[in-house]
Image (tube, helix red, strand yellow):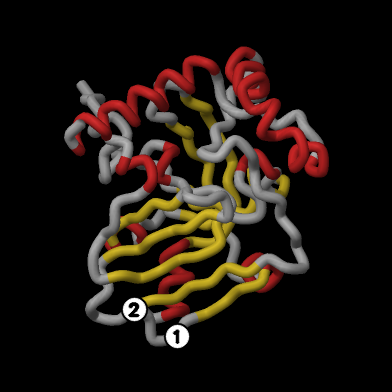
Amino acid sequence: MSASDERRYGRAAFLALLAGGGTAFLWAAKANDVVSPFTSAFSQLLGNLFPVGGWRIYTVSGSMPIFDERAYKLEITGLVDNPRTFTYHELAALPRVHEVRTFHCVTGWTVHNVRWSGVRLSHVLDLVAPQATATAVRFTSLEQPYNDSLTLDQARLHDVLLALELDGKPLTRPHGSPVRVVIPEMYGYKGVKWLTKIELLDHQPTGYWEELGYDQDAWVGRSNGYHSA
């Protein structure tokens, strides 16, 4: 099987999974650790049949990481002059911004008027001072092997956030607690949830979904076979 065949197969398999639904989030944290591997298929079906507030929750591993406020760290490293590691409270203390945007999933569903609150990624990048050779940003999730990337110019778009709140409340576990990337102009698969690491690199790496055939530049209406009128 060729590499292109593998990518097409991976994308087809993912779309088939979505037909069965996204991972539901009705399970308590402790119970999820024990029964998640056995309930994944059923909870995905429930999540798609009964979306909460229009959302369908997807994972790549079948379970969701648990946020421990005392232990959480966001590491920012790579081609930067001032590498930093933020605790949750340090990140939450940075200047806060708010946006109301439509969330677009590449599978075709949307959620309108989503109220995000968080920190502009461009502000965080200024704090670590990217070096002249840095051209890309890689995001790594607590949910392995989920990762994705942007060019540095894309990461500096004014509306790209490290979101900490959704609709006026701290992010819940299904929505990426404690921190997720929000890129309103791109499809949701680029917005890494359960964020734990940001790396500045001299090239843009291929992310988890791109390895399965999705577009690197996930512009809404202009990628993945969609074309705006």
Q: Residue at x 54, y 48 (%)?
A: 193
Where is residue 83 shown, x and y percent of the image?
47, 82
CA gap between label 2 and label 1 equals 9 Å
Residue assigned mark 2: 79
Position of 171 with respect to 129 (left or right) is right
Q: Residue at x 79, y 42 (%)?
A: 29
What is the quadrant of residue 57 in the picture? top right
Position of 174 with respect to 188 (left or right) is right
Q: Residue at x 43, y 30 (%)?
A: 105
Three-letter code, disc 1: Asn
Where is residue 157 shown, x and y percent of the image?
35, 56
Where is residue 80 shown, x and y percent of the image?
37, 81
Q: Residue at x 33, y 28 (%)?
A: 11
Q: Can I make out residue 98 in this image?
A: no
Three-letter code, disc 2: Leu
* Residue extending farthest front: 1
Foreground residue among 37 and 163: 37
* Residue extending farthest bottom: 81
